[in-house]
Amino acid sequence: MSSEIAQRLGCYVVAGYPERLPQPGDSLAPEGYGLPSASTSASTSIEAPPPFDPPPLDDEAIISSASVAQLAIPPPSDSSDLPPSFDEATAQATTTPATAQDGAHKTKGIGYNSALLVGPSGDLLCNYRKSFLYDADRPWAREGPGFRYFDLPPPLGRLVIGVCMAPWNAYELSGFVKRVGGDTFVVPMNWLQPELDESDLSDEEREELENLKGPEHPCLSNLNYWAARCAPLHDPSPEYSRPPEGREGNEGSKEVVFVAANRSGVERGTTFSGSSAVMRFGPGVELVEAFSRGKEGVLIAHVL
C-alpha cells in the first residue's frame, strides 16, 4: 500500500508497522515475498539492511500502545531460538557512539516497532527500527540499533524518522534531530485519547472541554504534548546548525518541519486520538495544519 500511495502521489511515504521476525517453525518465505530490497542510494544510514525483510504481522497480531494486556503474540521463551541472520546484520552495522545501542540485538522480542521509507518510484529506501522502547513495546519488540537520518532531495532535506512513544523527558530523538541538523522530522504513532482530570474545572470550563472532545476537533492536549517532546527544536540556541538559505526563523535559528501521523478510530474498545498534524519549529512552534480526532485522509500542508 505504501508503495502504491508513493507512486500515485509522486511523493515520499513513511509508514509505521509492527515488523515480525521469522519464528521457529515458520516456513521460509517464497522468493520475492515480503518487502522489496532496501536501497541505500538516497539515504545516509547507520544500520546495515537485513538480508531479508519478513512481512508485517497479520491483523490479529497488531500491537498497539493501548495496553500491554492486549498483546496478541507472546514473546518466545528463549531468544536463542530466533534465527541469527538479523542479529548478524545488526552486529556488523556501522554505528556511531552517540546512536549505537549496545546489546540491542540480544533482546528477546519477536520483532521491531518499525517504519518504512518509500520513494516516489515505489522503491523501499529504508526500514527504520525503533530504539529507546516504550513500556508497551518491551514485551514483544527488540531495540533497533539507533537513530538514523536520510538525505532526500529539496525541500525535504535531511529526514529523521521516529516511531510513536518513547521516554520523552531526556529528548533523545529530538536531540538527535538537532545534532544532525534535521530539516524534516516524521513520527508515525498510535496515540490514545487522553483521560483528562476535570475535578478542578468549573461547570463552564467542563462544558467547553466536552465540546472540544468531539471527533470534529483535534486533540489539543496531544498536540501540545507532541510539541513539548520536541522542545530542543524550538528553544532558540546559538549552537544549533546554520539554517538552510531561505528558511531562517525570526531569530536566525533553523526551522524543522514536524509531521505527527497518528492513528484514529476505535479498536477493541480503545480510542485513538487522531489529530495528525504538521508543525513548524524555529524559535517557537507554529501549527501549520491538523486533522480532527476522527479524520482520516491525506493532510496537505504548505510549509515553504
Image (cartoon, rainbow, N blue to C red):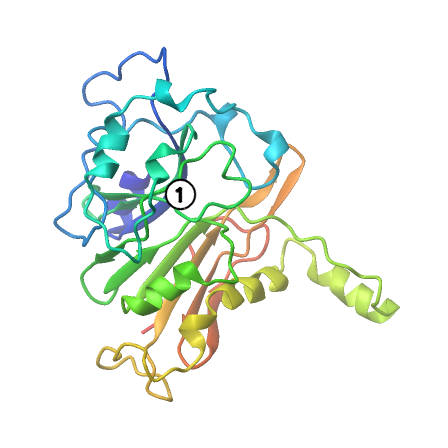
Are there few (<14), some (14-19), or many (20+) residues within 10 Å of tag 1?
many
Determine if residue 286 is in view.
Answer: yes
The reply, left or right, for residue 289 in relation to residue 192 is left
Instruction: Reply above or below: 128 against 290.
Output: above
Q: Position of residue 179 (x, y in %)?
A: 31, 68
Question: Residue at 47% across / 20% down in the picture?
Answer: 77
What is the secondary structure assignment of the residue under circle 1? strand
Q: Position of residue 81 (x, y in %)?
A: 36, 18
Where is the C terminus found, in terms of image quarters?
Answer: bottom left
Numbered-mark total: 1
Q: Which residue is mark 1?
A: 16
Q: Quadrant of residue 250?
A: bottom left
Q: Position of residue 162 (x, y in %)?
A: 39, 53
Q: Position of residue 258 (x, y in %)?
A: 40, 64
Where is the N terminus found, in terms of image quarters?
Answer: top left
The reply, left or right, for residue 68 in relation to residue 106 is right
Q: Quadrant of residue 282?
A: bottom left
Question: Which residue sits furthest right?
Answer: 203
Question: Residue at 63% across / 57% down in the picture?
Answer: 216
Determine if residue 301 is in view.
Answer: no
Question: Which residue sits furthest left?
Answer: 41
Question: Residue at 27% across / 31% down in the picture?
Answer: 87
Depth check, front residue: 211 or 109: 109
Instruction: Reply above or below: 189 against 3.
Output: below
* Residue type pointed to by label 1: Gly
Instruction: Reply above or below: 173 against 17.
Output: below
